[in-house]
Image (cartoon, rainbow, N blue to C red):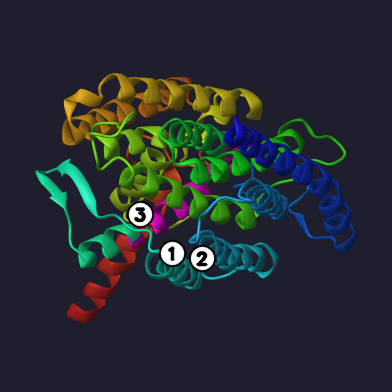
Amino acid sequence: MQILVHIFLSFIVAVSIALFAVPVIVRIVRKLKLLDQPNIRSSSMTPIPTLGGIAIFFGFMFGSVFGLFGQELPEFIYILTASILILFIGLKDDLVTLSPVKKIIGQFIAAGIIIFMADIRFTNLHGFLGIYEIGIGAGVVLTGFTVVVLINALNLTDGIDGLASGISMMATVIFGGWFYISGHTSYAILCFSLAGSLAGFFYYNVYGKQNKIFMGDTGSLFLGTIISVLLIQFNEFNIDQTQPYSIQSVPAISFGILAYPLIDILRVMVIRIMQHRSPFHADKNHLHHRLLLLGFTHLKATYTIIGLNILFIIAVFALHHLGVLRLIIYIFVSGGLLFMIPAYFIRSRKLIRKNDPVQQLLIPGSSEELLKNRRSKNLRIRKTIQGESN
């Protein structure tokens, strides 16, 4: 009962801090004119205050501190240190824009703090490709890769109202529920602290009028950092299958819990590479952009994607006996097919605007603008070759 009180307290404190902080941040941002100006990739057409991630961070921090009072979690200080580093990276990117290289370097430094100082890393693959225990070197590489991928996946998910916060809230509640019933109560407190701060932010982001706000990179990078820690520990705490409530095929279960951001980031990068572009080149190729193009509102698109992710979660828990590899293949194949459905309707309704170079097709292929640019490039190459031959 005492643990439930701690969890409830952490959630309430986090919600309260976020609800109090957002209006204050909105007033400051408007006064300093630090608004998110619409551009060719924006889903919103009006300037909106950003930096909502600050409210999420403070809600999480205060909720965790109050909830963890009397609990032992020595690595919390290092988790908080990595989070603060990422928070400042996101804050600087929101204010003056950081290059992708500098952001990646900062993310790897944060991953290093989590791995070497908090001592949080993968030590077991749970039978994936027949591999169980892994060495320190492999664990460090895999953990660093996972942290950076999740940070960027959550960052790219933050494209429409409520999506990144909604997906993250759903994941933290699932992780937190399992941590609680399995006896890892300190991590349950972290989960519900984050869920509470996200709930407060979600209210203003989705339903706010005067105090509407975006989380910005400040929030999305921070979310990826904390959720990567929760995911790693979720895997580590399930190594001993003799413990109550242990879960089989836990790497695949983890993937299913975050199916939308992980499948979407992989899909758009593959398409960009097939179109001979940088995988980090911005476009409107994400599923939420496609749903908006089909006439969905932000709220309808957000709830549709969250509902789709919940179906994945139900499916992977129901099919956990299939094994890690088969379950991951199932997620990739079914997810890829489902995510292609909007492309079919977009093509059939001819909704792609020919004069919009960033509006690429979901099905690998090139827009008229890309084809035109490629033809011009080929023509220049032919002229150069002819000139050299003459």
Question: Mark 1 belongs to which amino acid?
Answer: Ala
Residue span colored magenta: 144-165
- State the CA–CA distance, disc 1 to disc 3: 16 Å
Question: Mark 2 belongs to which amino acid?
Answer: Tyr
Q: Position of residue 372 (x, y in %)?
A: 40, 51
Secondary structure, mark 3, is: helix
Question: Mark 3 belongs to which amino acid?
Answer: Thr
Q: Is residue 50 left or right of residue 113?
A: right
Residue 157 belongs to magenta span? yes
Q: For mark 1, what is the residue?
A: 118
Query: Quadrant location of residue 297?
Result: top right
Residue name at image x 61 percent, y 35 percent: 2
Secondary structure, mark 1, is: loop
Query: Quadrant location of residue 42?
Result: top right
Q: For mark 3, what is the residue?
A: 146
Q: For mark 2, what is the residue?
A: 78
Q: Position of residue 23 (x, y in %)?
A: 85, 46
Q: Do the numbered discs 1 and 2 sit on residues whose CB atoms are within 8 Å?
A: yes
With respect to residue 267, does 277 lie above or below? below
